[in-house]
Image (cartoon, rainbow, N blue to C red):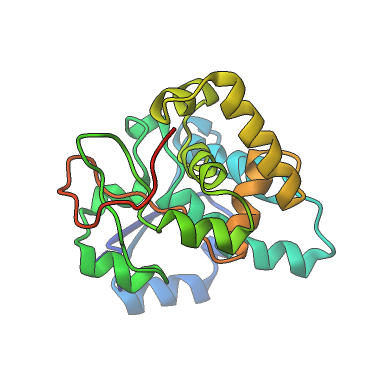
Amino acid sequence: QRLGVTIQRLLTDNGSAFRSRAFAALCHELGIKHRFTRPYRPQTNGKAERFIQSALREWAYAHTYQNSQHRADAMKSWLHHYNWHRPHQGIGRAVPISRLNLDEYNLLTVHSYPSAMRVTNDGVKPTMPISTGAQLLQITPRQYEVLVLLARGYPIKTVSRMLNISVATAKTHACTLYQRLHVKNKGEAVYTALQRGATLEWAEAGAREVERPTYVCR
């Protein structure tokens, strides 16, 4: 509701939980039209299965958790990353939240850090100040830039081109930031950064620059 999204229709499989009277009563109370998929028709359940596989690969089995509660607590951060920062091939490598066309006020009510930078004609710039994100994670400003681009889904070659550095240098920055965050891969690095409060946010392309960065890309 806080994002202006109202659920009108719901499509589920024929699981006992969805067939229960309690679930039917809840849908009726909320004014939601509930329909079921056809039995033995896996095509209609393909998108849900795809999401489940992504969740298992990127959240449930991507990290070593202390216990089941630790894993459950990590789901909120992963869902935020999935909806706000992870590019999706099915919608042109955009992030799902971009389909809502939220204004800046709406963005700030959801994220804990205000937007301090914008994308300019010179290239893409993170919305959290570089120095703030780097200090928060105890990594260098350049390493934070690399991390934000990796979190956005760009391959390392694209990262090097966007930052005007060599591929070898970009790989070195990535490996070093993994070591400093005590993680093994990009997924763990993004998860750790979000857990520590880094937003890894990005502004919409083509927006006017509001505050120029105080660093120089080398």
Query: At 54% from the left edge and 55% from the top edge, which residue is drawn?
Result: 134
Choose between 176 and 100: the one closer to the eye: 176
Q: Hey, which quadrant is residue 194 in on the image?
A: bottom right
Q: Hey, which quadrant is residue 193 in on the image?
A: bottom right
Residue 24, percent across and down? 44, 70
Q: Is residue 52 above or below residue 70?
A: above
Is 74 left, or right, of 42 in this rendering?
Answer: right
Residue 197 visible: yes
Question: On the rendered image, what quadrant is the N terminus found in?
Answer: bottom left
Q: Hey, which quadrant is residue 66 in on the image?
A: bottom right
Question: On the rendered image, what quadrant is the C terminus found in?
Answer: top left
Query: At 22% from the left edge and 69% from the top edge, which residue is drawn?
Result: 105
Query: At 22% from the left edge and 41% from the top edge, which residue is drawn?
Result: 120
Residue 153, percent across and down? 48, 35
Choose between 137 and 56: the one closer to the eye: 137
Query: At 39% from the left edge and 68% from the top edge, which residue is drawn?
Result: 111
Is 95 left, or right, of 155 in this rendering?
Answer: left
Residue 56 visible: no
Is 181 left, or right, of 193 in this rendering?
Answer: right
Count of numbered tags: 0
Choose between 140 and 37: the one closer to the eye: 140
Choose between 122 and 49: the one closer to the eye: 122
Q: Is residue 5 above or below residue 63?
A: below
Residue 122, percent across and down? 25, 34
Residue 166, percent across and down? 52, 20
**Residue at the outermost left position:** 208
**Residue at the outermost bottom position:** 29
